[in-house]
Image (cartoon, rainbow, N blue to C red):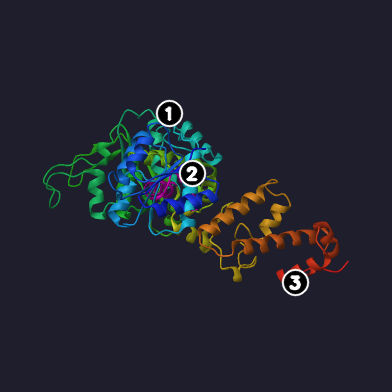
Amino acid sequence: MKPIWIVDDDESIRWVLEKALARENLATKSFANARDAIAALEYETPQVLVSDIRMPGDSGLDLLQLVKSRFPGLPVIIITAFSDLDSAVAAFQGGAFEYLAKPFDIDKAVELIRRALDESLRETSVESGPAETPEILGQAPAMQEVFRAIGRLSQSNVTVLITGESGSGKELVARALHKHSPRAAQPFIALNTAAIPKDLLESELFGHERGAFTGAQTTRRGRFEQAEGGTLFLDEIGDMPFDLQTRLLRVLSDGHFYRVGGHQPLKANVRVITATHQNLEQRVRDGLFREDLFHRLNVIRLRLPSLRERREDIPILVRHFLVQSAKQLGVEAKRMSDAALQFLCGLELPGNVRQLENLCNWITVMAPGQTVEIKDLPLELSQEQGSGAAGGTVAAAAPAPAESYSAQQHHGTVTSVATLESGVNGAGGPDAWLALLETQAASMLSGGQQEVMAVLGRQFESALIRTALKHTHGRKNDAAVRLGIGRNTITRKIAELGIDGAKDD
């Protein structure tokens, strides 16, 4: 491994960092100015570069710019006594791995250098998407059913109603239905009926004649005319005003409509696809949606699964969105650590794919370094999990304080006694409990939990002893022998942990 370079005109800073890194068995090489470091780059490169920002001659930002132009994968940590916003922004815009203000805690500095070192030693190639990205990503069985339905409908002009939660990708499915239909060469027009004021929606859909109302100075073609020969996608159809539902029903029934203020019927050669996140049957029962229109729209119903139902797709979606976001910003795509990716797979994500995409955009802009850890994610994600919203296979809730942490209070978390016992008993594979334990530990550490070892240690001991007692039908002496501990030890542990059901042999 190549050495870590320290560039600082302050000899004391160089000395402190050298000694601290030496204790970590990390080789270093120091420079008193940027000029010497730039000269050395002609014949060697470091594993990580740590540089002061203000030095005589060339500045740390000058050095950063040169390094990033010649060695874009080399992590650079900028340190400075001038912790002002301009310096921080300039450092990050220049591609710095992280920004550290003096005076700094030496242990935190070493930890940061360690992170940069891990980043440097990783595979530098970023996994990129295929040359032509599919219009919809998904490998989960639930999504395969959607793909099969799109295929079966590919040569049909039948009306389709797409249902699913907000953000699940209903418009993408509508576009795919159009793209693979005989109307693919004609327009695809999308309209969110909930986003248009009621007074304007009729004109938006059907157009208007000149002078039809105040402000109508010219004749305007509506969405039905714009979509002639193609597909009209009406999103959030459940929010359409009741009186307009009647006009839409007439178009679907006889294929004709009138512009607002018009007297000449116009023929509509349009395939209508609608979508909603609402329960239309319930809205019909509530008198908010016409039953006859519902039956007209509900010829073929296509239900999109929520992201919670296709968690196995989250990794490929995350990689896609990170690459897409990086291209838009002109930066290198971030990578998720295994722990962070597992954490994301356990989130509820009520906003579904749209929320995940927004999160990936946030990560691209805000997360430090190229490899994203759990602690780099927005704090509110852990807080949301801690509120008990998580229901996935990997819950990552932020735990309660150590003194109140118990299996009864946290029966829903991944490291509850019941879950650990199932892991000890082999549920999910021999290493499943280790993965769950690592995930919970990472979540607790990132959430600022104190005494993590003590909290998880008590949970682990309790799970082992409870499991052993089950196998010995409550005989604690026999359980102690099975566990390889003494009689007095198991008696004390049972009392400390509040375990019931134990008896003397």
Report which residue position mark 1 lands on: 155
Front residue (pair 395, 444): 444
Of tags 2 and 1, the one toward the viewer is 2
Distance from Cα at disc 3 to Cα at disc 2: 46 Å
Circle 3/circle 2 CB separation < 8 Å: no
Q: Earlier in the sequence, mark 3 or mark 1?
A: 1
Residue located at (12% from left, 43% from top) = 218
The CA span between labels 2 and 1 is: 55 Å
> How many residues crowd around disc 3 within 10 Å: few (fewer than 14), some, or many (20 or more)?
few
Residue 431 placement (x, y as % from top left): 67, 47
Tell me which amino acid carries mark 2.
Leu
Indicate the quadrant where residue 459 lies. Answer: bottom right
Residue assigned mark 2: 117
Q: Secondary structure at mark 1?
A: loop
How many residues crowd around disc 2 within 10 Å: few (fewer than 14), some, or many (20 or more)? some
Answer whether residue 373 is magenta in the image: yes
Q: Is residue 84 placed above or below 176 in the rendered structure?
A: below
Give whichever of 21, 93 is nearer the camera.
21
Residue displayed at 71% across by 63% down:
462
User: Looking at the image, is mark 3 or mark 2 earlier in the sequence?
Assistant: 2
Decide: marks 2, 1 in contact (CB < 8 A)?
A: no
Image coords of residue 345 (percent x, y): 53, 48
**Residue type indicated by callout 1:** Gln
| Mark before the other along the chain sequence, 2 or 1 | 2
| Real-space CA distance between mark 3 and mark 1, rounded to the nearest whole angstrom | 70 Å
In the displayed structure, 397 sits above or below 33; it is below
Q: Which residues are the magenta region?
A: 353-374
**Nearest the eye: 373 or 106:** 106
Q: Nearer the viewer, mark 3 or mark 1?
A: 3
Cβ–Cβ under 8 Å for marks 3 and 1:
no
* Picture coordinates of residue 153, whole percent (x, y): 45, 33
Residue 495, label in figure: 3
